[in-house]
Amino acid sequence: METVLSNLYIGVTLASILLLVGLGLTFTFGQMGVINMAHGEFIMAGAYVPYVLQTTLFEHARGTAVLVAFPVAFVVAGLMGALLERVVLRRMHGRPLDTLLVTFGVSLMLQQLAKDLFSAENKEVVTPTWLRGQWHLGGVTLTHTRLFVLLVVVATVAAVWVFLSRLAAGRRMRAVMQNRQLAAVSGLPTGRVDTLTFFLGSGLAGIAGVAVSLIGSIGTTTGTAYVLSAFLVVIVGGLGKLRGVVLAALFLGVINAYVEHATSSTIGKAAVFAFVILFLQLRPNGIVTFQTRGLAA
Amino acid sequence: MSDLETAPPPRGAELSPEPDVVDVPEVVRRRRTPMAMLVPGSQSPWPGRIAFVAFAAALFALPGVLGQSSEVRQWAEWLCYAMVAVGLDLAWGYGGMLALGQGLFFGLGAYAMGMHLSLEQVPKGSLPSFMSLYSDYKTLPALWRPFQTFWMSAAIAVVLPMLIAGLLGLLVFKRRIRGPYFAILTQATAVIFALVLIGNLKLTAGFNGLTGFTKIFGRNKYAPGTDTWLFQIAAVGLLAVLAAAMKIVGSRYGKLLQATRDSEDRVRFLGYDPALVKTVGFAVAAGMAGLAGAVAAPVIGIVSPGQFDFLPSILLVCWVAVGGRGKLWGAVLGALLVNWLRVTVSAARPNDWQYFQGLLFVLVLAFMPGGLAGFLRAGWQSVATRLGRAS
């Protein structure tokens, strides 16, 4: 029973990070058909933010640095995303597969940039004192860092939900996502909405990066591993739907944790992939789909 | 597969053998001069055939020109990548399927031949050297047994990738999963393949991979001429793959494949099954990648998971994009040119290659979607049209 619950805990924290990464991907994918291979590098950028803060401005307040890192990482990664959208992706409308490769080119450059700036070796973010420790709950060990990550994710997702459902900017975003032409003829500035979407999606990756830096060491390829799993989350979850991504991230994260515990890490990844293929046999468009008459794939 | 060939074509859809039904540039229709044959789209098979022979001649002359055996071996490796690129171009450029996991098939081929080579190094019936280090196997594991003979290994290297691609293709295409979804799923296959290889240390030598091939098909690796010999094998392989791809592209099936790329729904309404068309294309591409892997194993001299991970797979796609998708020679050009650039630029400025490469991909894909082939073709078109008119 205890191991079952411990694995659930590990699975849910993994799922929560996948969720943050996947949310950004699904917004840009759902709205602009862009598969952003550089998304992983936005995670990396976010992960380096607490490291940079701890070694420069907040050298004597390393705990505070982690808290400050969240909004800073959001803005840094968000600006990188907005810049990418403005400079390159805007010119490539309607060529989703090409944007995939273009963003891959960008990701190569960003990785090299990180290598030049921070050297190739992995860095550690110092865990704040108030995050060291764990609770024991009926035999299950809850480490504080993972619990904190979970709380941050829940708060972020709640904020995203409020943004999408209650604020005008969020409604505009959803409108463009569901029907770009109709949104455009209704007078929405779709170009500006696109930039905002990219800012938001990339910013979420930045927050995910800070969370990742609390769990393990960070390096120039930190983002890659997460982003590949997050792509699968997006596929299973369905395009541009908050609910679908939440469910898919939970599914995949928990399955991964259980199979990994029962067998090995590699079999766990293979099992997740097999699950995705099987799932797509049942629901090719993901868990949650738009009701649409469009033929777009 | 047989379904595809025996299915009666819908009425009125038979392709007329007369070339004048197809879209022929005005110049060609007016006068059949020798120069007009050179106009792109002239439907004449001769420019392609002549170019093919010229390319073959250039390939076999190359080792003599290069001289140094390390360079010859390097070029032989690139020829293997070019083989994968041709298959990828077939799937992506002609079939519209962005296969981001060709590393899986390339790797399967490479491991099949690598396992055979590992067994060649030790006396018949004994275990490959890494196995006595990492494992407690007493006899050869069942997985390794088929690789004792060369022909069996070669057959597995090509057939196994085709079977896996066929199965995956059917599962995916039947459910009409396409575009970016297909790309990501194939990418995941390559990642998982590498993970499984690393995870099974006892059977695959894990992260280090198979190496130490001093005896290669009865020859000594260090003997003079072995590099040139391997280069020639790679060259023959590339030419065979290229010829097969040219044949496929020109065939009825090739037209169907391109039609599926351009309008899958219309192909379906005409009575064909696009899922089957795409599956065959994907499987052929996988077979070519498998063959390339089988040749690459002795050429590179090491077979390890890192060579077939997602990064090399997506790099391959980018090479095809730079060379020009939708043109078979574009794929070959891209694979050879980018690799040559990599070695040349890295030698001069080791740290800047990644920036250069990333920038190259961004610029070509954003501003020159046809790649180099498209660029050269446009230039050639204007020159050749003028020549055709003048003669």
Image (cartoon, rainbow, N blue to C red):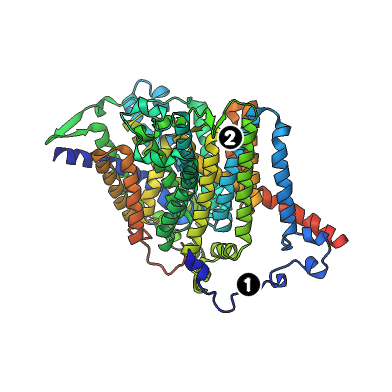
Task: Report which residue position mark 1 lands on.
Answer: B15
Q: Between marks 2 and 1, how big is the CA–CA gap? A: 48 Å
Q: Residue furthest right?
A: B391
Indicate the secondary structure of the residue bearing disc 1: loop
The chain under label 2 reads B
Image height check: is A283 above or below B335? below
Q: Is residue A5 left or right of residue A190?
A: left
Q: Residue furthest left?
A: A138
Nearest to the observer: residue B381 or residue B308: B308
The chain under label 1 reads B
Nearest to the observer: residue B272 or residue A195: B272
Q: Which amino acid type is marked by label 1?
A: Leu
Task: Report which residue position mark 2 lands on.
Answer: B355
Q: Say whether marks 2 and 1 touch (CB < 8 Å).
A: no
Q: Residue at x 47, y 29 (%)?
A: B121
The residue mark sitting in front, 2 or 1, is 1
Which of disc 1 and disc 2 is earlier in sequence?
A: 1
Q: Quadrant of the N terminus of chain A?
A: top left
Q: Quadrant of residue B21?
A: bottom right
Nearest to the observer: residue A195 or residue A216: A216
Indicate the secondary structure of the residue bearing disc 2: helix
Residue B194 visible in image: yes
Q: Is residue A182 left or right of residue B335?
A: left
Q: Residue at x 51, y 44 (%)?
A: B314
User: Can you give x and y, in whole percent of width and height, for residue A239 in the image?
Assistant: 40, 56
Label 1 crowd (10 A; few <14 / some 14-19 / many >=20): few
